[in-house]
Amino acid sequence: GNPATIVFQSMAASPELLRTNSDIQVMVTGHLPASTTSTLDPRLLTVALDVNYCRRPNDCMSVRRLDLPVCSLLNTPGKCEALVPGQEFSVTQAVHLPLSLIRGTYSVSVQVLRTADSQLLSCYSLVEVEVMASLLGNRFRDYADALVAFGMASSASYALGSLFPRLT
């Protein structure tokens, strides 16, 4: 028969504004659809996370790949019970964002795979996840970089405009 599909109902991070050198909590709730005919043993599943740093849309580079057993993520310490169709499950994971983390935009791909044959059961993507500076000096540097970039763009626009005659 068809393999079970794991449905993620919600994915959230706390705090919502992600900053370097801080601890965050990632929370996921999900379930197996009620139409699924059997339970699913989480000991046989792996979550593959692929974290990418993006300079522009569709211009990303992989910075971290993690393969985690599903049992280590479920909020059931010391036991790993079967996922029952229609019954909700939750995952809460603490993550530390180091100071050395590149500030900017990230995308995260989340895949749930059957460990034995790497069959894909679910796939989700988080795009445009922003990580901002935590230190005041870095925040000012980010604003200064933005102002310099704006100044350069406006002066280039002025210089290009002066090369063409007025059309009025």
Image (cartoon, rainbow, N blue to C red):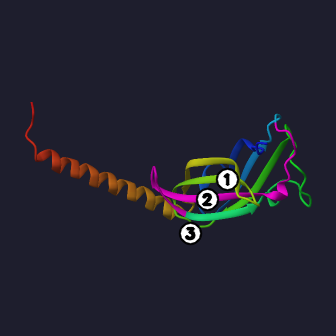
In three-dimensional space, the C-alpha distance between marks 3 and 2, rounded to whole angstroms, equals 19 Å
Circle on res. 50: 2
Mark linked to residue 100: 3
Q: Amino acid at mark 1?
A: Gln
Q: Which residues are magenta?
A: 36-62
Q: Is residue 119 left or right of residue 89?
A: left
Q: Which type of secondary structure does the marked residue at label 1 adopt?
A: strand
Residue annotated with mark 1? 111
- Could you tell me which secondary element the residue under label 2 belongs to? strand
Q: Nearer the viewer, mark 3 or mark 1?
A: 1
Q: Is residue 132 left or right of residue 112?
A: left
Which is more toward the observer, 90 or 100?
A: 90
Q: Residue furthest bottom?
A: 100
| Label of residue 70 in the image | none
Q: Is residue 88 left or right of residue 127?
A: right
Amino acid, disc 2: Asp
Image coordinates of residue 86 in percent, x first then y, are 85, 37
Q: In the image shown, does 44 or 96 lie closer to the viewer?
A: 44
Kindly check if marks 3 and 2 are in contact, taking CB atoms under 8 A apart as contact: no
Depth check: 5 or 101 in front?
Answer: 5
